[in-house]
Image (cartoon, rainbow, N blue to C red):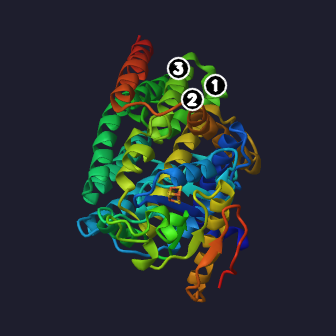
Amino acid sequence: MTVLKPEKSLWIYHLNTGSCNGCDIEILAALTPKYDAERFGVKLVGSPRHADIVVATGPVTAVAKESVLRVLEQVPDPKAIVVTGVCGITGGVFRGGYSLAGPLDTLVPVDVYVLGCPPKPEGIMVGIIKAAEVLELKRRGMYTKEVVRVSEKGEVLDAVR
Amino acid sequence: MTVAYWIGWLIVLSIWSFLIGGFDRKIVARLQGRYGPPFWQNITDFVKLLYKRGNLATRTATSVVDVALIVGLVAGVLAVSVLPFAGTNGTFQVLAFEGDLIIFAYAFALMALVYVVVGFAGRSPYTIVGASREVSMLISYEIPFILVLVALGYRAALLGGATVNSIFSMSSLMQAKSQVGILVGDPIMLGAFLILLVLGPAMVSAVPFDIPEAETEIVEGYSAELHGPRLAVMFALKHLKLIAYSYFLWSIFLSPSGLAWWANLLLSLLGTLVLSVAINTIPRAVSGRFRIEQGAKFYLIGPGLASLLLLVLVFA
Ligand code: SF4
């Protein structure tokens, strides 16, 4: 029954925590007909309650922190969080700014990092596919909370464990 | 025996409804030059939703939502069960009684009301806006729908020679069909079929009339606060509605009579696929979403006036 695996249906929720909008444009590019994310069962949903994977961008500003935490709380389990762009991973160009409350992994556990500023759509797609593997491990109860890094061009730098 | 046959038929239809949803996504993807998801994608989505666990919003009235969803499922099963299906000798109806056409219309309105109740029970701005939009759409498409059913029943009684007190029953429609062959051959019936076809997208809440669940504006409207198995039931209800409506159109108007049961079954599945592509997929692929007042105006002026005309023609 591998074709009916829950991980073949990935509903993603796009969460902007205060990014420069560069990564958001690339996420939308990954959903366009050229890259056709729907062939992996990916669908963009508008409500966090419908989501399996949260694709987050941005360094989590102080204003956005409360809302981000509330949104992530609403996502039903099993869920995976993909952070795209270096500013979501380390703070990037915004690091040390007075208005930051993040990056996101200081607030909630993150499963996949997609490096790059911004990453290419290929990188984001690979990040989502890796998140699907993370979801499968979580469903089986075999997940060890190791973060998977994906380069901006889509090379996988760590194994999913 | 009948019960086993009926349950089997329900299972086949519900699996087929998910497959139709998958074909829909595949066809739209191909039209856009994409590869698209596999055609069983909607079954995967349904199974996935059953696995999800989380907390509902504290303000959501959970018990109301649960009761509404159960009522919706019962209404969906009822709508399918009053329709004639392929039996060992011709067609066969599980629930046959006088006025079953009204039960069908009632079940459809009930399914729309389930959306409304779920929306208001969600108590989030998105779900409430979705529910109130569903109410306005319901008012605008229900009037032509009922008028067409009246015209349809009366015409069938005239054609089949049934008595006036059985004008709202499927059996008189079947009787008329056995006389005419294929029911759309009759001009009044053709008119009714075309109006029902135009009403289709609103009945099954497909684009351009999916205004109550516009996912880009009000994040799926009434189901915005649901997740997991409850959302799965909502998802199934939507598919059930689509297949019930297209199977209604197929079995009343288009299906030929006097076939072997297996030919009838295969043709039914094929016919519902073609009709649901016409109702759901093609409008979705070629058009964007209307605004609510455009949708309401469209249905009251277009099919509304057409159904009044049809009624006048029938009684004239
Ligand atoms: S990683 Fe770069 S492109 Fe992406 S949101 Fe941050 S600053 Fe913008």
Mark 3 or mark 1: whose residue is earlier in sequence: 1
Residue B137 x/y as whole percent = 35, 35
Q: Distance between the residues labelled 1 and 2?
A: 6 Å
Residue at 43% over, 30% down: B290
- Identify the amino acid type marked 2: Ala
* Residue at the extreme top: B316
Which image quarter holds the N terminus of chain A?
Answer: bottom right
Residue A40 visible at all: yes
Q: Is residue B195 above or below residue B81?
A: above
Q: Is mark 1 on a helix, strand or loop?
A: helix
Mark 1, residues whose alpha carbon is within 10 Å: few (<14), some, or many (≥20)? some
Mark 2 or mark 3: whose residue is earlier in sequence: 2
- Identify the amino acid type marked 3: Gly
Q: Is residue B265 left or right of residue B312?
A: right
Mark 2, residues whose alpha carbon is within 10 Å: few (<14), some, or many (≥20)? many
Residue A56 visible at all: no
Residue B176, numbered circle: 2
Give me the chain letter of mark 3: B
Residue at 26% over, 51% down: B125
Mark 3, residues whose alpha carbon is within 10 Å: few (<14), some, or many (≥20)? some
Q: Is residue B199 left or right of residue B273?
A: left
Q: How far apart are marks 2 and 3 (CA)?
A: 16 Å
| Residues at circles 1 and 2 in contact by the CB criterion of under 8 Å | yes
Please name the residue that numbered disc 1 is placed on. Answer: B180
Instruction: Choose top left, top right, bottom left or bottom right for residue B10.
Output: bottom right
| Residues at circles 3 and 1 in contact by the CB criterion of under 8 Å | no
Q: Is residue A18 above or below residue B247?
A: below
Q: In this view, does A105 lie above or below B132?
A: below
The front one of B274 and A142 is: A142
Please name the residue that numbered disc 3 is placed on. Answer: B191
Residue A147 x/y as whole percent = 58, 80
